[in-house]
Image (spheres, grey):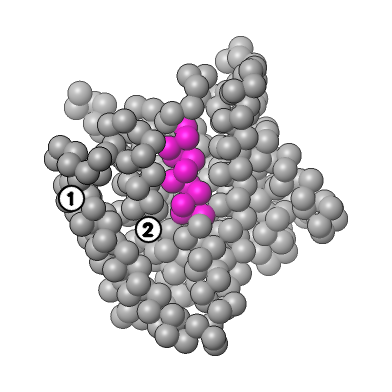
Amino acid sequence: MKNSFLINWFYLSLLVIFWGSTFALTKYALVDYSPLWIVAIRLVIGFIIIYSILLIKGERLPRGYENWLWLFLVGMTAFVPFYLICWGTIYLDTTMGGILFGIGPLFTLIAAHFLVKDEKLNFIKFFGIIFGFIGLYTLLSQDIANIDESLLNNILPQIAILLAAIGYSVQNIAVNIMPNISLMQKTSGSFLIGSSIAIIIAIFAEGPPSITLLDISFISVLIMGIFSTAMASIVMFNLTKKAGPTFVSLTHYVLPIYVVVIGTLFLRETLDFTQILGMVIIIFGIIITRFGSKKPKIIN
């Protein structure tokens, strides 16, 4: 039991590093690549890695109409959030993007209440969700007050990051309730769909990219494909199955802080008091929901 507990937290720490580094790596990748091609390339890299592991293990892609409907959903919840994060990062600092992404556990709790039998809301969880959204409002209050001036440069990119967080929450739940096929089949199948859709859209919308293998932009996309996509998905799918979607959502406790540290150290970004206060309130709201997870359900 103790070893399982430590292993789960080790995997959770890996997810924080893999996902949190995406925001800074995207900044470097955007120098030479569009959001569409960043997503397409990283998903192709992820698929190649996962499919190779699948074949080495002696498995094949899953069969069956129902399986591929679920994999289409999971594949889209990879492609769409990836794209929204890339697009939003054009206009936002990585620190702001990371804090906004940290709201994800609250969306996971809401979705899990309706879709996962043992993840029902109670009053403590509900109070934590309300607290988290107060933090979100605090975080966005300055831009909301000046919405006409900041619609494109701030509000819409912030909404994009929030929608990406919702997309990850949907993926988290879907993986937990989809048919019982293997981890490698889930990952390779969803990446096959996600990468195919991304490549088709990117080619028709923008034409083929110009790739320089030793360029910092391509290296950034390569790292995202290997670690933030392939390895992170293996860890996330496996951890979700073992510990549940709510436990996986704990990455969002640490992820905003990790992204802030990376952004300030490597990209020289800064935070104002309102952003720090919003982040603290959001994290505190998530902590409240964790206490609520130990209590019986009282909201049906």
For the stretch drawn in magenta, what is the main secondary structure?
helix
Could you tell me which quadrant the N terminus lies in? top left
Q: Secondary structure at mark 1?
A: helix
Give the magenta part as a residue range. 164-175
Specify whether residue 206 is in view: yes
Q: Residue furthest left?
A: 295
Q: Residue at x 72, y 54 (%)?
A: 37
Q: Which marked residue is nearer to the observer: mark 1 or mark 2?
A: 1
Residue drawn 63% across and 26% down?
68
User: In the rendered structure, does residue 87 fall within the stretch colored magenta?
Assistant: no
Residue 190: % across, % down: 61, 33
Name the spot of residue 187 as percent of width and height, x first. 56, 31
> Mark 1: which amino acid?
Phe
Q: Is residue 185 left or right of residue 241?
A: right
Q: Is residue 281 left or right of residue 55?
A: left
Looking at the image, can residue 266 be seen? no
Estimate the x, y position of residue 280 in percent, counting from the top left.
26, 67
| Magenta span includes 169 | yes
User: Residue at label 2?
Assistant: 103
In front here: 298 or 148? 298
Dot 2 falls on a residue whose secondary structure is loop
Residue 134, position in %: x, y? Answer: 29, 68
Query: Which quarter of the figure has residue 205?
Result: bottom right
286 on left or right of 169: left
The mark total stands at: 2
Q: Which mark is residue 123?
A: 1
Q: Is residue 126 above or below residue 271?
A: above
Residue farthest to the front, as pictured: 300
Amino acid type at circle 2 is Ile
Instruction: Using the image, determine if residue 255 lies above or below residue 149.
Output: above
Q: CA distance from mark 1 to mark 2?
A: 19 Å
* Mark found first going from the N terminus, 1 or 2: 2
